[in-house]
Image (cartoon, grey):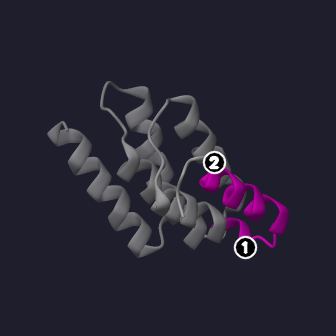
Amino acid sequence: VESHTITISAAISACERGGDWEQAVELLSMMLRSDVEANTVTFSAAISACEKGCRWQKALQIFSVMVQNLVETNTVTFNAGISACEKGSECEKALQFCRAAGEAGLQ
């Protein structure tokens, strides 16, 4: 993993912990526009930041970009998506995440 990926992923995680979902999304967007590879950790942290910021639609949008870019998902990714939907009172969307996690072989 490239050092820039690690550094920016750490910054996104810091934004998540600090409650700054907008900055987390901006950092992810910057990565996607550049030649720095965004990985599972990067996307999961951005989704989690949106979850903490009660921005379930943005979390789903980021998850969609993650899948489109063929970035591997994991339990953290799905849990953040489910939690974002739950905070947005989007039970059906949360159930879709649960089904997708099962289809991906995650428990």
Q: From the top left corner, tell me how far across and down residue 61 is, in percent.
A: 65, 45
Disc 1 crowd, CA 10 A, few/some/many (<14, 14-19, 20+) = some
Question: In the depicted view, which residue is nearer to us: 76 or 90?
Answer: 76
Alpha-carbon distance for marks 2 and 1?
20 Å
Which residue has dot 2 on it?
A: 103
- At 56% from the left and 72% from the top, the residue drawn is 52
- At 56% from the left and 59% from the top, the residue drawn is 78
Disc 2 crowd, CA 10 A, few/some/many (<14, 14-19, 20+) = few
- At 46% from the left and 62% from the top, the residue drawn is 76
* Residue 5 in the figure: left or right of residue 92: left
- The magenta stretch spans residue 7: no
| The C terminus, quarter of image | bottom right
Disc 2 on helix, strand or loop? helix
Q: Closer to the camera: disc 2 or disc 1?
A: 2
Disc 1 on helix, strand or loop? helix
The answer, for residue 46, to whether it is visible in the render is: yes
* Residue 53 in the figure: left or right of residue 40: right
Magenta stretch in the rendered image: 84-102
User: Can you tell which quarter of the image residue 36 is in?
Assistant: top left
User: Can you tell which quarter of the image residue 13 is in?
Assistant: bottom left
| The N terminus, quarter of image | top left
* Residue 4 in the figure: left or right of residue 88: left
* Residue 54 in the figure: left or right of residue 40: right
Q: From the top left corner, tell me how far across and down residue 5 is, in percent.
A: 25, 42
Q: From the top left corner, tell me how far across and down residue 64 is, in percent.
A: 63, 40
Question: In the depicted view, which residue is nearer to us: 49 or 74?
Answer: 74
Location of residue 94 with respect to 86 vertically, above or below: above
Which residue has dot 1 on it?
A: 86
Pick whichever of labels 2 and 1 is earlier in the sequence: 1
- Give the number of the disc on residue 54: none
Amino acid bearing label 2: Glu
Dominant secondary-structure state across the stretch colored magenta: helix
